[in-house]
Image (spheres, rainbow, N blue to C red):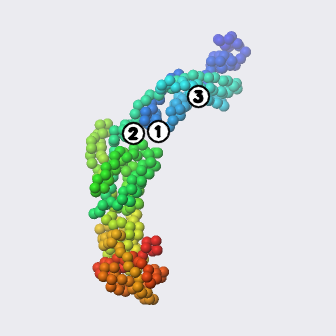
Amino acid sequence: MFCPECGNSNSEMIEGLCKECFLKQFSILKIPENTEVTVCTHCNAKLEEGKWKESNILEEEIIYRALERAIETDSLIEKEEIELKILQMRGTIAECYIEAVATVLGEKIHQSYEVEVRLKRTVCPDCSKMNSGYYEAVIQFRADNRELATEELVQTDEIVKKSLFTQSKKNKLAYLAEKVTMKEGIDYYIGSYKAAKKITNDIKNRFGGLTKESPRLIGQDKSTGKGLYRIWISLRLPNFKTNDIVKYLNKIGQVIAIDGNKVLVNDLNSFGNFSVFLKEYDSIKVVKTAKEIKTSNIISKSPSKIQILDPDNYEVVDIATHKIFDGYEIGDEVNVVKIDENLYIVPEIENI
């Protein structure tokens, strides 16, 4: 057989051509002259196979990845090296240069290509939702039978901000659509229900509290026929705070810590700590707030008792001694609270 291109009959024939003519016509890469990629104008997410992927990446990286996806290599090539360059941008069109070196049939060949990548700008569904003020959940932040304290409001704002920042790296709907401040508390409108759940747990772990969810039907999904719901998440902090004095069953104590599940209390009789789960919240009664704790002075101290002055009537009151009072001296000022005509010494929390 002879080569129809050059007439050579002494060379190995490959697909009807001699090796030299075959390599002249051989293309290392198969790539369309024009490649189009749909990109979100706001977040640079790209649409691939009907799904939006990889948001917040640089435009150059989008172009390079589009080229990499479009390039196909022949099965005959070995040891290929491919270099991509963006020559210039003309609006939404990137003029690109591709240089390829590969070994084919034992011969090293070098080829270059000039192609275009067109960026089709649109808005992805998540950005469309964000720009329209879309939200899936509302966190209703309240306190039970009291106003929220300033520190609770400030810290909760920080928790919401930090949690959304962290979650937004993986969840584009983790954003604050709106914050509404009212006398009874704050409503946080959150783009994602999943993000709202995480925020609620973060706040609850910091302050404790009780949660309740109330779904509300807002419409119907036209494609599936299923109902569309928004979730209202009620987060209600306890009516007590750290340092308040509470009564649980027959125990009187000072709240020293609150977390998502329980309350840690220091018993003002035994000065030992005990825990109460928040599911027993209705059994915890506030008897004095931290602001109602007063001060008095130690006027006498013996191995069996300490004498202090009642701050209301200045009468001398005997209190059984305890090892927690070992460091106290006559004349020292102490915190006290009066409950049902009984006077209690309230140790500093850091000394408990």
Q: Horizontal and vertical percent for residue 303?
A: 45, 89
Mark-to-mark CA distance, 1 and 3: 22 Å
- Write down the residue under mark 1: 55
Which of the 4 image quadrants contains residue 206? bottom left
Q: What element carries label 1?
A: loop
Vertical relation: 116 (above or below) 343: above
Amino acid on which disc 3 is placed: Lys
Q: Which mark is residue 85?
A: 3
Q: Are marks 1 and 2 in contact (CB under 8 Å)?
A: yes
Q: Earlier in the sequence, mark 2 or mark 3?
A: 3
Q: Which of marks 1 and 2 is nearer the N terminus?
A: 1
In this view, the residue in front, 21 or 134, is 134
- Write down the residue under mark 2: 126
In this view, the residue in front, 122 or 302, is 302
Mark-to-mark CA distance, 2 and 3: 31 Å
Residue sitting at x 37%, y 46%: 176
Vertical relation: 162 (above or below) 280: above
In this view, the residue in front, 179 or 4, is 179
Residue sitting at x 39%, y 56%: 154
